[in-house]
Amino acid sequence: MKHLTLLSWVSLACVAACGTAEPETFSVIPSPNQITVQAGSYDLKGAAFFVDAAVPEKAKNAIEEFRVQLGTVTGKQSKTVSDEASAAVKFVVDGTLADEEYTLDVTGEGVRAAASSDNGFLFAVQTIKQMLPVEVYVNAKSSKAMVLPCVSIQDKPRFKYRGLHLDPCRHFFSIEETKKILDLMAIYKLNVLHWHLTEDQGWRMEIKQYPRLTEVSAYRNGTMINKEWGSNDGIRHGGFYTQEEMKDVVAYADKLGITVIPEIDLPGHMVAALTAYPELGCTGGPYEVWTRWGVAEDVLCVGKEETFTFLENVLTEMLDIFPSEYIHIGGDECPKVRWEKCPDCQKRIKALGLRDHDGHTAEQYLQSYVTARIQKFLNDKGRKIIGWDEILEGELAEGATVMSWRGTQGGIQAASHGFDAIMTPSSEGYYFDYYQSHETDKEPLGIGGYAPIEKVYAYEPFKGIPDDATGHILGVQANVWTEYIATPEHLEYMILPRLAALSEVQWCNADNKDFTRFDAALNHSVKIYDELGYTYCKDHWGVIGLPGSEQPARTPEELEAWLAEQKD
Ligand code: ACM
Ligand code: ZN
C-alpha cells in the first residue's frame, strides 16, 4: 500500500516553492511502495556521512562512490565521520528488514537510510539520486542545489526476479554498451541481466576448449537486408566476448546489485556452433552460420554422446565465468525433423523407451531427456536451470524454472504444476523488439507487434495464475531480441522508456501502480536519459523515429485513415 500523507503530489510543488531550499523533484521510478511526504527539505551540500561498520562491503563502496560524486557535483566534499551523532547522512543496518528492503527518512536535520543487504542500501542510494536534480548522475560540478524533499519511505520489491534480456547474437553489442544498459537497469532497481550468448547467427562466448566457436561460429557472412528474405548485405558481422570481458561484465553488474544469468540455447538455435563442429549435428553438415532470421531445422544431434561431452565442457567453462544460481539453457524452438530421421537420435529414443503419448511425440520426450540430463549436470554443480516454456512439452524434472514467453500460458501451466516461473509474455508487450507505436512507417525497423509503454505498464503478472500458485511467480522480465536492432542507438530506443514501465510492474505492489503518477514521474526519467546521453523513443510525447529522422506523430484522425489505408 502506498501512503501519501500530509501533502499531495501537487502541494509538494508548494513545498518546493515556499521552502528555503528547494527540492526539484519527487519523481522516483519505480515508485516506492510506502511513502509519507512531509514539509521541508534537506540540502546535501557538504553533509557529513556516517556508514555503520556492519554495512556490507559492496554497499559501503557504493555509498562511498556516491559521497565522493556528491562532493564533485556540489563543489563541496563531505566528510565521513565515525560517530553517528555528528553525521547528517547516515547509513545503518537494520536486521529486521528483508533482503532488498530499505527505509529512507529525510528530515530538516538530515538523511537516514537503513537496510540489511547490499541491494537494500544500493536501492536507497538510487532512490536518493532520483529525488535529486539529474545533474547528480554526472561527475561534474553543477550549479543546481542537491536538495531532498523531507520524506519517509519504507520500500521493498514485489518480485525477487526483475530481469532484462539482451541478445547480442543477432547483432553484436560491445561490452561498453552492455555496461551502459546495466547502468540503466540499476537506476530502475532491476536485478537480473539475462544474457543470451548463443544463436544460429552467432556464438558470442569464448570457450577455451573449443577455439573454433570464436574463430568460426562468432562470425557470419552477411545479414539479410531489412525484411527481404533471400537478400544478404555482404558485410561480415560478428564478434565475441573473451572470458575476461565476461567476468568484467559480471563484476560490473554485481557492483550495481545485478546478477548476470547467461544463456546457452540448446538443443536448437545451434547452427553457429554446428558450423564449427559439424560432427555434432544429425546430418554432419556442412553448415553455415545463419545470415537470416527464423527457426533452423538443424539442431544438435542428441543421439550422440559427443554432443553431451561438448555441452558439459562448455557449461563447465561457463560456470567458472558466471557465479549465478541459475543458468538459462534455452530449449525454445527446437524442430524435431532431423531427430525423426537420424539413426543416432532414433537409437537413443529406442534405448530410452520413449514413445508418443499424452499428446507429445517421442522426439519431444527426447528433448525432455536432454533438459533433464543437463539439469542434473548443473544441479550436481550447485546450479539451477531456467528454460523457455517449450521445456514443459513432454516431462519436466522438479526444480526447473520456466520462462513464459509464448503468452502467459506457460507460466500459468508451470506454476499450477508446482514449477517456478518467470513471466516474459510477448502477448503482453514484454518483447521490446515490438513497435512502440502504430506508425511503423516512421519507426525504426521492428520485428512487428505493438507494445507501447501503456501496454507494458498495464500487465498484471498474476493474471490467470491460480491463487495458490502465485508464490511460484518469481518475477518478470522483458526480452530484447535484436534481429532488426543493429546499433546502440536503436537498442536504447527500444528499451527506453519502456524499461521504466517494466520496473514498476516488477517492483510496485499492484495497488501502488498508477499510470498518471508514473507518466508525470517519467518526465524526470527523460531528463536522466538526456543528461546521460541515452537515445530513447519519444512516441509517448508525439515524436517518432531515431535521432536525425524524427517526425511528428499523426493526429488520431490521420492515424485512423493511415491504418485503414494499410489494410486495403
Ligand atoms: C523466443 O522468443 N524464441 C524465446
Ligand atoms: Zn541425431
Image (spheres, helix red, strand yellow):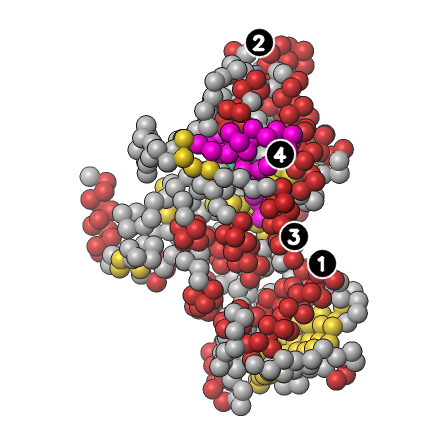
Residue identified by numbered label 4: 207
Q: Secondary structure at mark 1?
A: loop
Camera-near label (1 vs 4) is: 4
Position above or below: 376 against 306: below
Residue 99: numbered disc = 1
Nearer-N-terminus badge (1/3):
1
Residues at marks 4 and 3, CA–CA distance in whole angstroms: 19 Å
Residue 55 image offset from top left, x and y in percent: 76, 66
Is 219 a magenta residue?
yes
Residue identified by numbered label 3: 251
Nearer-N-terminus badge (2/3):
3
Q: Secondary structure at mark 2?
A: helix
Mark 1 in CB contact with mark 3 (< 8 angstroms):
no
Residue 62 image offset from top left, x and y in percent: 66, 65
Label 2 beta carbon less than 8 Å to ligand 2: yes
Residues at marks 1 and 4, CA–CA distance in whole angstroms: 35 Å
Residue identified by numbered label 2: 343
